[in-house]
Amino acid sequence: MPGSEVTVRFPVAAPPIEGVPVEVLLGQMRGRLETGDERVRAFLTAFGRRLLRPALARRHPELGSLGFFLRPSELARTVEGLGGEHIHVPRGLVFHVPPANVDTVFVYSWALSALMGNRNIVRLSPRSGPVAGVILDTLHEALAEADPVIGATQRIVSYDRDDAVTAALCAACDLRVVWGGDDTVNALRRHALATHARDLVFPDRSSFAVIRAAAWSGAPGAARVSAAEGFVNDAYWFDQAACSSPRTVFWVGTASDCDTARADFADHVARVLGERGWGVDAAMAVEKRVAAYGLSADGVAERVEFRGNALADVTLAEGAAPPRRWLGAGTFTHARIGALAELCALVERRDQTMTHFGFAGAELDELARELAGRGVDRMVPVGGALSFHRVWDGVDLPTEFTRLVTVTR
């Protein structure tokens, strides 16, 4: 297929190998893995430990979370969770298309698929950030001590938009995994899969936080500091562009309680941002102001408050629907509701993660039942929005990465 060439980023020695024809790439991927393969576990464990090195984890805290996800106990728990009456076998060749704006997503997707015994090709965008480069360097460090089957069965490639390359990889795969938004999903679906193959897609999602005002005001100072730090991690690690990062904060309680709690919350968040030196460049600051004042002009917002360039708080007008689109890093819309159950009328199918503070487990369980799949696939404490789990967007990923074989004895 003329022009169907990729740059191989893993496994190679630096610099990457450019101009590899797709048919050659596919022909090189030989080797057999099993679900829960010990050789893959050893490689992922070694890779995860390298990500947890103090100097690296301090510089890129999201890599510390990734390393924690790859610890041996979690890998074992994932494999053990496949129990049941069926035999789990690898699905085959999995083609992953992760987003360019969240550098760690491709590792979670690929690692779980490899753990399930699949051969994998990951298309890493040429626009990926510097953290992706750090990840690739660390993968190569771990590969030096790994079983050769890892290098024989796993590929990370880059290429600019090229329908010939994408079509060839789509035609060859047994499962196509697409992250990164509606446009990406629709663009990939134009390329046919083999008749036996299937799609696993993660389209545009939006997330929010919900805080009980009385619980916030009544919490010890240390608890409020910790929650503010967690909220900043949830929102700012990926410039609020991650699907699970909160964009709206719902305050639950009376108007006076919510006003008091919200002011204290904003002070805590601003203090954390100041202590960490979290800055926003001039272009982003302008974009945030345009977005926030645009909401006011449209009658969606009744008040806008900026705390430097890093934090913008927008009070939604009564009855206004929370905007789901990204408004710029560090821009949050706020709304008050009288009770947690009122979220049922506000949630949409695209809402993914609800971070919460001040609610009992029974209340959250009841809300999940009342929503009944209309939206919200995750309810996690504030600070846990970016903690990846093998069940994501309501999908059990290890199960999706395997085929079930029925054996009747």
Image (tube, grey):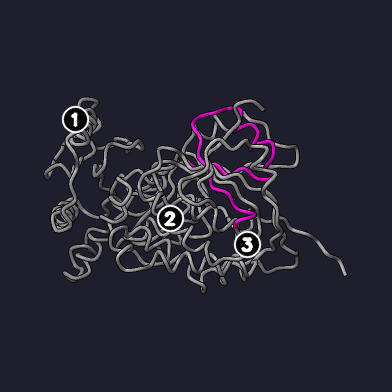
- Looking at the rendered structure, the kind of residue marked 2 is Asp
Give the label, 1 or 3, closer to the camera: 3
Give whichever of discs 3 and 2 has the lower sequence position: 2
Nearest to the observer: residue 290 or residue 38? 38
Residue 293 circle label: 1
Q: Secondary structure at mark 3?
A: helix
Q: Position of residue 46 (x, y in %)?
A: 49, 68
Question: Cα distance, mark 1 to mark 3?
Answer: 56 Å
- Looking at the rendered structure, the kind of residue marked 1 is Tyr
- Left or right placement of residue 384 versus residue 219 in this view: right
Nearest to the observer: residue 40 or residue 69? 40
Q: Secondary structure at mark 2?
A: helix
- Give above or below for 301 relative to 200: above
Q: Residue at 45% across / 60% down in the picture?
A: 366
- Looking at the rendered structure, the kind of residue marked 3 is Pro
- Give above or below for 283 relative to 227: above
The residue at which mark 2 appears reads as 137
Q: Residues within 10 Å of mark 2 (few under 14, many from 20)?
A: some
- Left or right placement of residue 343 versus residue 236 in this view: right
Residue 276 circle label: none
The residue at which mark 3 appears reads as 148
The magenta stretch spans which residues? 151-179
Q: Position of residue 155 (x, y in %)?
A: 58, 49
Nearest to the observer: residue 62 or residue 169? 169
Question: Cα distance, mark 1 to mark 2?
Answer: 43 Å
User: Residue 36 lies in what quarter of the image?
Assistant: bottom right
Q: Residues within 10 Å of mark 3 (few under 14, many from 20)?
A: few
Q: Position of residue 337 (x, y in %)?
A: 29, 48
Q: Quadrant of the N terminus?
A: top right
Q: Residues within 10 Å of mark 1 (few under 14, many from 20)?
A: some
